[in-house]
Image (spheres, rainbow, N blue to C red):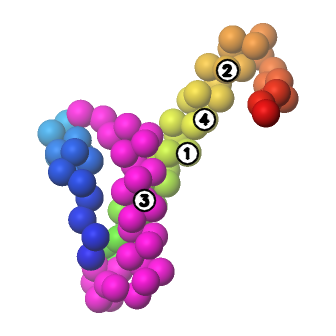
Amino acid sequence: MTKPSSRTKSAATDGTETSYEQALDELERLVAAMEGQQLPLDQLLQAYKRGAELLALCRGRLQAVEQQVKLLDGNELKAWEGS
């Protein structure tokens, strides 16, 4: 099983928050391990549960940022005018 980085693992166990980027990185590694069929059934279930937690964390962070952007833009999201 791929293990979370020491930074992500310590963030999860010492009470500090895991950043969006850390959560996304760990989620990507879990998905790769699950898709690569590298995990025994018990570890697969643990990876799935952890992945669901990370997905919820990422979605929550994105929704919070969206709300902040709405506030800054007068309560409406504007189309992104990127490249």
Q: Which residue is mark 3?
A: 27
Q: Earlier in the sequence, mark 2 or mark 4?
A: 4
82 or 72: nearer the viewer: 82
Graded by Cα atoms within 10 Å as few (under 14), some (14 to 19) or many (20 or more), the crowding at tag 4 reads few
Kindly identify the amino acid type of the residue bearing the numbered disc 2.
Answer: Val
Kindly identify the amino acid type of the residue bearing the numbered disc 4.
Answer: Gln
Kindly identify the amino acid type of the residue bearing the numbered disc 3.
Answer: Leu
Q: Which residue is mark 2?
A: 69
Q: Position of residue 53 (x, y in %)?
A: 41, 55
Q: Quadrant of the N terminus?
A: bottom left
Q: Report the span colored magenta.
A: 16-44
Q: Quadrant of the C terminus?
A: top right
Q: Nearer the viewer, mark 2 or mark 4?
A: 2
Q: Which residue is mark 4?
A: 63
Instruction: Measure the alpha-carbon separation of dots 3 and 4.
Output: 18 Å
Using the image, determine if residue 77 lies above or below residue 57. above
Instruction: Measure the alpha-carbon separation of dots 3 and 2.
Output: 25 Å
